[in-house]
């Protein structure tokens, strides 16, 4: 594996400090290859697998490439896909490329749609999903034709993808929204398609669709799920013409419509919008209060701070407290910092409240708060408070502060496997080059996952 590949792979280790059994599930041939110092030999073996391997062997290789976030074999995989109809290979490569928003397979994916009678349903569906993920404008017409055939096996995927591929081109977006709106009103599609059509129209962000979407929201005889989808779609357009329908829905009789309406207010500005968000904190339906907290976070609404503080301290729904803490962290002023410190230091608060508060404090100003967090970490360990301790470990693992160097050194020297892994995160995140030799020693650890992570950390520290 090249140094570049190792650096890409390291991001995965940062997100998951201890890998566990997942790596062990890879076929032994690839595990051995990953350990081999002969990089050229490894790459040659992988090329051979792509050219001559079975679908099972190629699937295992793709899984390895996903784990490593490796893209050096993309060209060979593109060539492979152009010349096979094996459904497992096609599906695997479409998913692998789509998850990375990686182009190169558009022509083959469109061909799968146009020649769908010669392909399996799984292959065609994977191709449709891929085109949507990479927002392939060239696929708009084939997808439109596919929707027009009303083939039930592909309709939902095709509608979703059509909205996505049209989003980046204003003219195409308006054409697609008009097509989908016409299909909705003129073809009387089954209920299962209606929500997907509304969502796809929202993906286009079409200004011309605002009247259509507002009409769905305002009609109380429509199903609640359709009104909720239309509110989300109006929010995606961000068009002020849709705001009256959203604000009216904030007071709707149905709690799900109310919560969706509040969530839809995020992109909009104005005194009426702020008032609607603040009023939503009083709603007895917990999802509406969650939406109010999320909208406050998105807008960094300082007027919401007293409401958020109250919800953090007294709301009986953990999700509301959690979203309120996140909002306080996003607003990030002197008042919110004091509230977060108070929430973190209060031992009677739940572990979740203290962990989330610590996360916000560390993200906003780690140097000012990291010593308190480390003290609480050690205290939690001495009291056998496992959930709190593990949560705070994750916080220090992603924090950026020079004050963490001594903790990283302590964990490397005397910590358990999890603590050593967190120490590697701290060393890499903060560039603790004074720990190079300690990390080098860990690269020889008996635990192969830890040793591999140490080697990746060493690459970061010494490059």
Image (cartoon, rainbow, N blue to C red):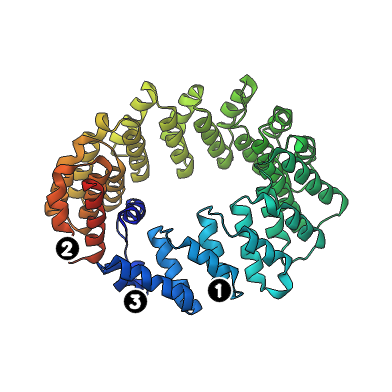
Decide if residue 20 is on the left or right side of residue 221.
Answer: left
**Residue farthest toward the top in the current orientation of the protein:** 271
What residue is pinned by disc 2? 445
Q: CA distance from mark 3 to mark 2?
A: 22 Å
Using the rendered image of the protein, determine whether residue 280 is visible from the camera's viewpoint: yes
Report the quarter where the N terminus lies: bottom left
Residue at left 42%, top 35%? 325
Left or right of residue 443: residue 335: right
Residue 450 occupies quadrant: bottom left
- Element type at mark 3: helix
Say which of 450 and 108 sits in front: 108
Q: Earlier in the sequence, mark 1 or mark 2?
A: 1
Residue at left 35%, top 37%? 357
- 306 vs 358: above or below: above
- List the residue tagged with mark 1: 88
Residue 91 relative to residue 442: left or right? right
The residues bearing labels 1 and 3 have C-alpha atoms spaced at a distance of 20 Å
Q: Say which of marks 3 and 2 sits in front.
A: 3
Q: Which residue is mark 3?
A: 29
Of mark 3 and mark 2, the one earlier in the sequence is 3
- Packing grade of label 2 (10 A; few <14, some 14-19, many >=20) is some
**Residue at disc 2, secondary structure:** loop
């Amino acid at each position: 594996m090249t140094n570049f590949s190792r650096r890409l792979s390291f991001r995965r280790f940062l997100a998951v400090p201890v890998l566990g059994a997942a790596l062990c599930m890879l076929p032994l041939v690839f595990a051995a290859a990953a350990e081999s110092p002969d990089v050229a030999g490894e790459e040659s073996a992988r090329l051979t697998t792509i050219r001559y391997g079975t679908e099972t062997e190629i699937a295992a290789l793709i899984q390895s490439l996903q784990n490593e976030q490796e893209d050096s074999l993309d060209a060979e995989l593109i060539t492979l896909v152009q010349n096979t109809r094996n459904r497992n290979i096609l599906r695997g490569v479409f998913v692998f490329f789509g998850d990375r928003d990686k182009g190169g397979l558009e022509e083959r994916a469109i061909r799968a749609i146009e020649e769908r009678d010669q392909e399996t349903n799984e292959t065609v569906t994977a191709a449709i999903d891929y085109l949507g993920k990479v927002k392939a404008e060239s696929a708009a017409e084939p997808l439109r034709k596919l929707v027009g055939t009303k083939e039930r096996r592909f309709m939902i995927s095709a509608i979703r993808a059509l909205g996505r591929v049209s989003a980046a081109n204003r003219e195409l977006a308006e054409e697609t929204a008009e097509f989908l709106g016409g299909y909705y009103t003129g073809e009387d599609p089954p209920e299962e398609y209606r929500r997907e059509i509304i969502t796809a129209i929202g993906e286009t962000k079409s200004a011309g669709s605002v009247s259509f979407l507002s009409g769905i929201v305002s009609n109380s005889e429509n199903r609640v799920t359709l009104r909720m989808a239309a509110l989300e779609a109006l929010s995606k357009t961000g068009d002020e013409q849709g705001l009256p329908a959203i604000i009216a829905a904030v007071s709707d009789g149905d709690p799900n419509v109310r919560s969706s309406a509040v969530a839809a207010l995020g992109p909009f500005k104005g005194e009426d919008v702020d008032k609607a968000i603040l009023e939503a904190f009083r709603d007895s339906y917990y999802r509406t209060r969650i939406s109010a907290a999320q909208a406050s976070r998105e807008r960094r609404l300082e007027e919401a701070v007293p409401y958020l503080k109250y919800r953090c301290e007294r709301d009986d729904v953990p999700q509301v407290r959690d979203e309120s803490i996140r909002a306080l962290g996003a607003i990030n002023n002197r008042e919110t910092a004091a509230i977060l410190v108070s929430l973190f230091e209060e031992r009677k608060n739940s572990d979740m409240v203290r962990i989330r508060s610590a996360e916000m404090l560390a993200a906003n100003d780690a140097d000012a708060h990291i010593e308190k967090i480390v003290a609480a970490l050690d205290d939690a360990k001495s009291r056998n408070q496992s959930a709190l301790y593990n949560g705070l470990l994750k916080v220090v693992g992603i924090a950026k502060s020079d004050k963490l160097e001594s903790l990283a050194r302590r964990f490397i020297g005397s910590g358990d496997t999890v603590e050593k892994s967190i120490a590697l995160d701290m060393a890499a995140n903060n560039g603790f080059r004074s720990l190079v030799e300690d990390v080098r020693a860990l690269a020889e650890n008996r635990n192969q996952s830890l040793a591999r992570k140490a080697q990746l950390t060493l690459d970061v520290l010494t490059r």
